[in-house]
């Protein structure tokens, strides 16, 4: 949060320097990581994972992303108790670990997974024996 307020203060100082006369109230500003498109307070999305005919809902509490600005190359999504985890590493690897599953499901040739600017979309993606549908939105970004 400290970095966010430093950024807001820097933006306010820059606007004053170029002659903007309106006083800025930081509480009126929407704060996101605009450099990467991550939205730290936003909707993280959710996935429906079907394994053996049974559908499970995965609603992460954290979605960490990395890659160049505005381009997801790696995503790790975890639930609050870390009982379920989803990982996507470019076009080369995807893994889904569901709570209570014996082992994670994974693939080295993910099909149906699209990496976007600040999200990853799963369109009936096959990850091992899992079928995964839904979208995850980045909440934090690491370079």
Image (cartoon, rainbow, N blue to C red):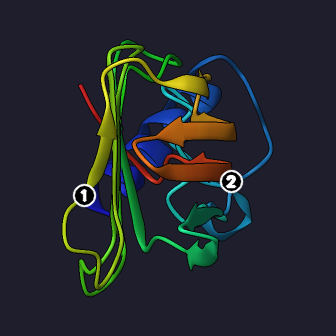
Furthest residue toward front: 52
- Residue 119 is drawn in which quadrant? top right
Residue 24: assigned label: 2
What residue is shown at x 58% (from left), y 77% (from top)? 56
- Using the numbered discs, state the Cα–Cα distance from disc 1 to disc 2 in whole angstroms: 49 Å
Left/right of residue 30 with respect to residue 65 in the rendered view: right
* Residue beneath disc 1: 104
Quadrant in the picture for the N terminus: bottom left
The reply to whether the C-beta atoms of the residues labelled 1 and 2 are less than 8 Å apart is: no
Left/right of residue 68 with respect to residue 19 in the rendered view: left
Percent across and percent down for residue 135 are 67, 48
- Residue 122 is drawn in which quadrant? top right
Percent across and percent down for residue 129 are 45, 50
Secondary structure at numbered mark 2: loop
Residue 83 visible (yes or no):
yes
For disc 1, the neighbor class at 10 Å (few under 14, some 14 to 19, many from 20) is some
For disc 2, the neighbor class at 10 Å (few under 14, some 14 to 19, many from 20) is some
């Amino acid at each position: 949060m400290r970095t966010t307020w430093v950024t807001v203060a820097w933006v306010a100082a820059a606007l004053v320097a170029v002659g903007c006369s309106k006083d800025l109230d930081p509480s009126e500003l929407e704060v996101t990581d605009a450099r990467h498109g991550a939205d730290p307070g936003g909707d993280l999305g959710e996935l429906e994972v079907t394994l053996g005919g049974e559908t499970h809902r995965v609603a992460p509490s954290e979605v960490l992303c990395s890659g160049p600005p505005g381009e997801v190359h790696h995503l790790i999504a975890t639930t609050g108790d870390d009982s379920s985890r989803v990982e996507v590493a470019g076009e080369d690897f995807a893994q889904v670990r569901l709570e209570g599953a014996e082992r994670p499901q994974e693939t080295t040739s993910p099909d149906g997974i699209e990496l976007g600017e600040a999200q990853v979309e799963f369109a009936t993606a096959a990850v091992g024996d899992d079928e995964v549908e839904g979208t995850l939105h980045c909440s934090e970004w690491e370079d």
